[in-house]
Image (tube, grey):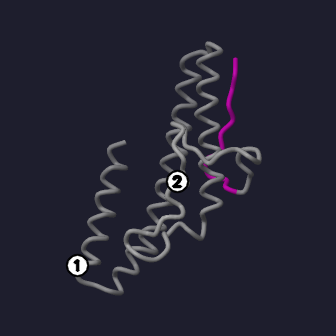
Amino acid sequence: MTTIQTRTEDTSTPGAAAGTPDTAAGGDDVTAEAGAAHPHGGPHGYSAQKNEHLKRLRRIEGQIRGLQRMVDEDVYCIDILTQVSAGTKALQSFALSLLEEHLRHCVAAAAEQGGAELDGKVAEATAAISRLLRT
């Protein structure tokens, strides 16, 4: 039986080996827009933690690849489902961290401006929370 160890809260351990591309499980380039200007002006709220976020995403990518290996090796279905749950929790934890940074940075900056800017940021955050709750 193959078992995959997961750590969703500890962000101090290194992710994938050096030279691993910054890609999500689907192969999309995570940093494709990194050089593009922020559409709402200023830096992104997660910019200060970008390297930590990328490490975390690489670990999650490794979990998903581990699921592929488990299926390939005909591992017992309940063991695979356990690892699916761990991967889901890791993504949810990442999403909550990103949401918190959005609230602290983007929404807080909009609160200083007030008016329509604040209303728009609150609406964005509410929509994001709604999407997270549906998963």
Q: Is residue 19 left or right of residue 34?
A: right
Most common SS among magenta residues: loop
The N terminus lies in quadrant: top right
Q: CA distance from mark 1 to mark 2?
A: 30 Å
Neighbours of disc 2 within 10 Å: few (<14), some (14-19), many (20+):
few
**Local secondary structure at mark 1:** helix
Give the x, y percent position of residue 74.
61, 12
- Number of labels in the image equals 2
The C terminus lies in quadrant: top left
Residue bounds of the magenta highlight: 1-11
Work out whether residue 5 or residue 108 is closer to the camera in this orientation and state it: 108
Residues at discs 1 and 2 in contact (Cβ within 8 Å):
no
Q: Amino acid at mark 1?
A: Ala
Give the x, y percent position of residue 72.
62, 16
Q: Is residue 134 left or right of residue 96?
A: left
**Which disc is residue 116 wearing?**
1
Magenta-span inclusion, residue 5: yes
Nearer mark to the viewer, of 1 and 2: 2
Q: Amino acid at mark 2?
A: Ala
Pointer 2 residue: 32
**Which disc is residue 60 wearing?**
none
For the point 46% across and 65% down, which residue is it?
100
